[in-house]
Amino acid sequence: MPLLDYSFLSKILPKAKIKKGFRNAKLSYLKRVRIATSLFFFGMGFCFSTWASRIPDIKSMLHLSEAGLGTLLFALPIGQLLGMPISGKIVTKYGSRTISIIGLLLYAFSLVLLGLATIKLELAIGLFLFGFFANLCGIAINTQGVYTQQLFEKPITGSFHGSWSLAGFCGALLSLLMLALKLSPFKHFIIAFVLILLIIVFNYKFIVKTEVKKQEEQSSYSFFKNPDTTLIWLGIICFCCMASEGIMFDWSGVYFKEIVKAPGALVALGYTTFMISMASGRFLSDVLVHKYGNKKVLLISGIVISAGLYSAVLFPYLIPCTIAFMVVGLGVSNVVPIIFNIAGNNEKVPTGIALTIVSSISFLGFLIGPPLIGFIAEMTSLKYSFAIIGVFGIFITVLVSRLKIFK
């Protein structure tokens, strides 16, 4: 169980109202802890969206071709992949609280390094560090999400992931402002770094503490010597979800342009509605889980993902396809928050390491999904490739219905 320090409350509460006051102050403190955790999730998403929003400008500044940019962008997932084997152990050994603070700070600082890049090598190094710290930060902050959830009776995990999604919109809006003011990516990234620094300074005191000594005893756990098959299956469920999510990020615009034949700026309509739907779904996730339970929500989510993708294939027209992409957004919104929370509460494996295992498997879906779409589309058509990815939603429903952990 995570630790919270309530000792300061006895100093600020009147002695005559100590019992009632302590209870009320404790509830207020717990709310503040939840806000702090949400803001750390927000900061993580804000860093990523800030970088993504200025990729075209950095491409122009460094005079990169499409192929050249694509090659350099591989440095980011390489950094993430190399960080995966050690992130869980670092978080387990030193505590998710410490690593959340340091990790988010370094994640934001590596964003500044990207703004300083003037040659390809500097950009590649910056992207590698950006990917590495993204993974370290992600494991630590998701671990914090699990610990914070343990302090509350009702589900709140979905709202944390919703904060990450909300940060995507805020990052995009700030980018529009920076472009209107004609500020360079470096100045933009400096402003983003300051905002992240403010989030850390005003919230680090409310990040949940854990027993580091106990974690150090658990850090010797080896997945290869004593694999937990439940975590593998949870990872596969997330793999199916992230593959579906990945094609929405990378191929929704192409689908609307080439298949739907959307005019002009409406090409971005599918991606935009998907993102809005996914963010909204994550904030609703906690209510749904509280009312119907993890299993029912996941079963329905898998069906919804497939229904959305197959609707886009069967009705490739502007309004039906827009609705279909919104449906996919609602489907994918619930899966990762629920699975990460279940994995983080695994009694046999330390939280940080459990999340590393699940996120590593799921991340492969995010990497493999978009290229698989391109490969299938090249052989057949983009519509058929979306239809094949639609099977992943069915896989989610089947796996959830058969795994004992959901019974």
Image (cartoon, grey):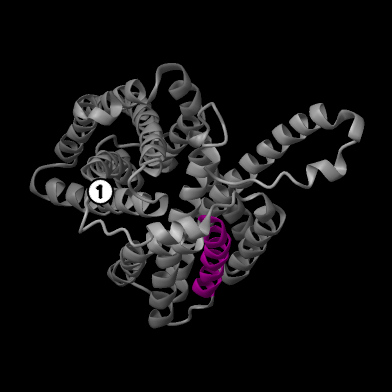
Q: Position of residue 391 (x, y in %)?
A: 17, 33
- Does the stretch in magenta take in 98? yes
- Does the stretch in magenta take in 17? no
Residue type highlighted by circle 1: Gly
The image shows residue 342, relative to residue 8, as above or below, that is: above
Q: Position of residue 273 (x, y in %)?
A: 44, 34
Q: Tag 1's secondary structure?
A: helix
* Horizontal arrangement in the rendering, residue 68 relative to residue 402 (left or right): right
Which residue is rendered at x = 44% and y = 42% of the image?
A: 265
* Horizontal arrangement in the rendering, residue 68 relative to residue 59 (left or right): left
Q: Quadrant of the C terminus?
A: top left
Which residue is rendered at x = 44% and y = 62% of the image?
A: 216
Q: Looking at the image, which is closer to me, 56 or 325?
A: 325
Task: Find the residue positioned furthest to the top.
Answer: 291
Q: Position of residue 367 (x, y in %)?
A: 26, 54
- Residues in magenta, as a range: 96-115
Q: Which residue is mark 1?
A: 365
Q: Looking at the image, which is closer to me, 246 or 17?
A: 17
Where residue 338 sits, quadrant-wise, is top left
